[in-house]
Each structure stands twice: as C-alpha cells, then as structure tokens.
Image (cartoon, grey):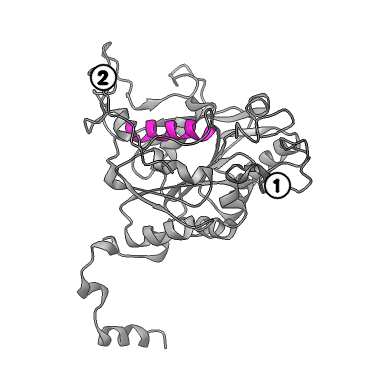
Amino acid sequence: MSYIMKPKVLHPAMLRNKLGLTLRDYEGSMSTLCAGCGHDSITAAIVQAFFELSIPHHRVAKLSGIGCSSKTPTYFLGASHGFNSAHGRMPAIASGAAAANRDLIYIGVSGDGDSLSIGLGQLAHAIRRNLNMLYVLENNGVYGLTKGQFSASADVGTKSKKGEANTQLPIDPVLLALSVGATFIARGFSGDKKQLLPLLKAAIAHKGFALIDIISPCVTFNDHEGSTKSYLHTRKNNVEVLEAHYEGADERDETLDPDPDGSDAPSDFVPLRGEITADYPEGTTLSVRMHDGSRVHFSKVPQDYDPRVRDKVFAYLTEKQDRGEIPTGLLYINEQMPEMHDQAKTTKAPLSELGYEKLCPGSETLAQIMAGYR
C-alpha cells in the first residue's frame, strides 16, 4: 500500500461543500495501482459522492480484505476510520464494528476474488443479516495481485492474457445477492462515472445492505480481446436497466451550486443522463423514499420492469445474462426489510458509548435474564 499523501495544493476557486471542505480533502494516499486501472476510477467516484453528500470523515469507517481492490480504501477519505482485514473476512469485521457502533457509515471495498472465493460465506451472511453498509465489489474477473488467474466471476469462454479459455461457471454477485436477500443491488461500470455517482449516493443513504457490483477492467491482465471484463466488451454489451437519479434530503447547498438563475431545482440532484423534468409522461418514472428522507428517482427503461419485485428482477437478469448482456443501474431495492439492529432490537445508543454499569449489570441481573430462558 501507499502511505504517501497527495500534496494539498488548493486553487482558491475550488468549490466547497456544506462543511467547507473541497474535493481534495476527501482524497487519501497516492495510488500504487497500474495506470488506467478501473479501481482508481471507482475511487474518484467514491470521493465525489462523499464530498457532495458533505459527510465528515470521522463518521465513516472503511474496511477491506486482500487484493488490488482492498488496497483502494487507502486512496480515499484519508482521515476516516479504517481496517484492512484478512483475506475474505471483511464482512465479519464490518459486522462486529457495526454491532458496536451503529452510528458510523460503513463502506467495504472488496474484489471478486476476495468476495466470491474465500469470502463467499462471509459475504452471504452479511447480506442475510441486512448489515447496514455499502459493499463495493470491484469486479475484474481475475486475481490481479497474483498475476491474472481466473477468479470465480470469470465467464465461461473468456480468455486469459495467454489465450487459455475459462471452462468453469461463474458466480454472479448480483444474482447471488438477490437470492440471499440483499435490500439494495446495483451494477455499474468503472468507465461510466455519471452512472456510478448517483448509485453510490443512493447506496450510502440506504438503510441496510447495499451491494454495488462494479465491472472494473484489469488493464494489465484482463483488458484484451476475448476477455468479457474488458473496457471494450463492457461498453459493447452494457444494457442500462434503470436511469437512477439521487435527490438528497437536505436543503440546497449554495456552496456547490450558486444557482445564479434563481431556479428551485435542488443542487444535490445528480442526473444520470439528463435531468428529470415535468415533461416526463405519467408512469415513466418511479420514486422511492429512503429512510433519511432522500429519494431515488429512476426511469423505467425496460417495459414493466419494477426494481421492487424480486422474482421479476431475477427473471429479467437471468434472461439478459443468457444473451451475454450486462445489465447496469439500480437493479433491485427493498426499503421494508429491517436492518441488523432493528432485527436484533438493540439499544439505540451505540454499544461503544454505553458505560460499564449498563454493559456489565452484575450477576443478579444476568441470573434474571437466564431465568427467562428456562
């Protein structure tokens, strides 16, 4: 990993968010990844998302496992909490941290090797608990850190840099998350920041487990002809399912958007392709209210596609997969499922802030609790 911080050279005209911070303040150390790596593009989108949401560093905990993807938390939010765990174990660490302090915003960054091989069971149970976190899966189909072996997400027939074809069936993280019970599922492409930014902002606002599977080509080992995770293949086969638009809950941020024409449009409304206006025909957009008051608006691109109906989403995605197409956008959302703390009925105060007397009430209280189970 790199621990060389970027020089803080700020132009006096740089925009500032509600906290008075610039985009540069949300960066971390210098990246040591290969030039052109899709992971660095994802990092830039994460930096932009937290900057525009005006989230202070101390409210964020970033976690990772092992691999090129798991290096990337070093490159954003340099003043936030962080933990680089063992291979595949990041979801368990995130679960423990969230259990102790429910007030932090958790973002885990992992890869297809870290999540879908040794960490598959860890990922599945974090989803099952509906852990309140954003899980960014940087998916390139290879083990980039160990010279390009096929990962569990490599498609059948995809060719390695040496020309060998993969023969094993892939694990699709989106279909996996849908089957296990994730409450927010999206897929993005590292080469499309306009699409990725509102997805990240909506996932941060979501209360529950939010998975974003991001196709992130490995420029060194998996960006050649014959690869199904290359820039060219992804662009050719990308099918945008839903145009997602995130609208924040807070008032307009005059710092980010001076709004010189005096319009009433919220400045923290981030369009994907074009701003939604009143000219949209009735029934072509759907609005989902998030727990914090923000909203996700998305346009129905496929006929009758509803991201809240799990069975229909599964059928649509498998149909596209059989055609070799890559559906992207906000694919599924469920705002009704309680997250981990609501399910367990834990105290509203974070465990990390409770005093000794409440955490250890004594043997008599413990005996009374145990008696209730007899």
Q: Would you place residue 267 above or below residue 53 in this image?
A: above
Relative depth, front residue between 135 and 317: 135
Residue type at tag 2: His
Residue 170 is labelled as 1
Q: Would you place residue 244 above or below residue 334 in this image?
A: above
Taking the magenta stretch, the answer to whether it contains residue 205 is no
- Left or right of residue 111: residue 9: left
- The location of residue 245, given as percent across then percent down, is 45, 29
- The location of residue 122, given as percent across then percent down, is 54, 59
Q: Which residues are magenta?
A: 38-51
Q: Is residue 101 visible?
A: yes
- The location of residue 279, given as percent across then percent down, is 47, 16
Q: Is residue 211 visible?
A: no
Q: Quadrant of residue 153?
A: top right
Q: Report the residue at 20% width, 69% height from top.
A: 355
Q: CA distance from mark 2 to mark 1?
A: 47 Å
Residue 12 is labelled as none
Q: Secondary structure at mark 2?
A: loop
State the residue position of label 2: 11
